[in-house]
Image (cartoon, grey):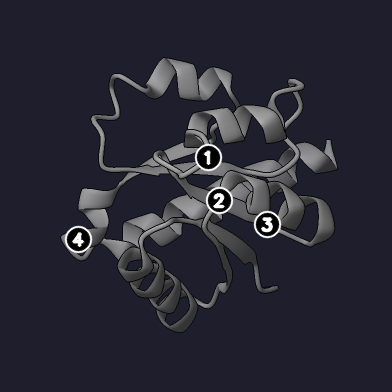
């Protein structure tokens, strides 16, 4: 299997360190990290990003706004997973319209279910790759 590059967008150093280390060491992802929406856009434009995993709350805008700016033209340029501590139900419709591929609760990370998180990333990437093959 080729290695996937995940761009983790998170402004908490603790979460960034824990999630990036776990995704890299236990699940084989290459992980790049940034702390803002502006840096995310630059990384997506400049690099070979397989999937963006973004916190909902960012210093310069929301993760939903970021997803819309990357995938808002109706065609998904990169799978986008929203990583949030907020209730998912209230965000779901707006997030899906903005091009969010999947959701992961930050509570899932805290309870040790990183396997589920990693699987959602892989599924989002594979679904995106399948659309490119059509």
Q: Mark 1 points at which residue?
A: 60
Local crowd size for mark 1, using a 10 Å CA cut-off: few (<14), some (14–19), many (≥20):
few
Q: What secondary structure is marked by label 3?
A: loop
Q: Which of marks 3 and 1 is nearer the N terminus?
A: 3
Q: At 58% across and 23% down in the image, what residue appears?
A: 98
Front tag of 3 and 2: 2
- Residue 110 image label: 4
Q: Name the residue under label 2.
A: 36
Q: Quadrant of residue 66?
A: top right
Local crowd size for mark 4, using a 10 Å CA cut-off: few (<14), some (14–19), many (≥20):
few
Q: Distance between the residues labelled 3 and 4?
A: 24 Å
Q: Distance between the residues labelled 3 and 1?
A: 23 Å
Q: Which of marks 1 and 4 is nearer the N terminus?
A: 1
Q: Mark 3 points at which residue?
A: 50
Q: Position of residue 80 (x, y in %)?
A: 57, 42
Residue nearest the viewer, comparing 90 with 66: 66
Q: Earlier in the sequence, mark 2 or mark 1?
A: 2
Whether the residues at callouts 3 and 1 have beta carbons within 8 Å, the answer is no
Q: Position of residue 26 (x, y in %)?
A: 41, 80
Q: Distance between the residues labelled 4 and 2?
A: 22 Å
Whether the residues at callouts 2 and 1 have beta carbons within 8 Å, the answer is yes
Q: At 83% across and 58% down in the image, what residue appears?
A: 46
Q: Earlier in the sequence, mark 3 or mark 4?
A: 3
Vertical order, 106 against 94 (above or below)? below
| The residue positioned farthest toward the left in the image shown | 111
Q: Using residue 47 as the reference point, say whether residue 64 is left or right of it.
A: left
Front tag of 3 and 4: 4
Which quarter shows the N terminus?
Answer: bottom right
Q: Position of residue 12 (x, y in %)?
A: 36, 60
| The residue positioned farthest toward the bottom in the image shown | 25
């Amino acid at each position: 299997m080729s290695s996937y590059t995940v761009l983790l967008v998170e402004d908490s150093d603790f979460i960034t360190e824990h999630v990036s280390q776990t995704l890299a060491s236990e699940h084989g992802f290459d992980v790049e990290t940034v702390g803002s929406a502006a840096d995310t856009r630059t990384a997506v434009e400049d690099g070979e990003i397989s999937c963006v995993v973004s916190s909902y709350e960012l210093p310069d805008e929301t993760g939903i706004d970021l997803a819309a700016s990357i995938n808002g033209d109706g065609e998904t340029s990169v799978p986008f997973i929203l990583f949030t501590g907020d209730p998912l139900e209230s965000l779901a419709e707006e997030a899906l319209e903005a091009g969010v591929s999947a959701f992961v609760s930050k509570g899932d990370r805290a309870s040790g279910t990183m396997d589920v998180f990693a699987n959602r990333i892989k599924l989002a990437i594979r679904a995106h790759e399948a659309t490119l093959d059509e």
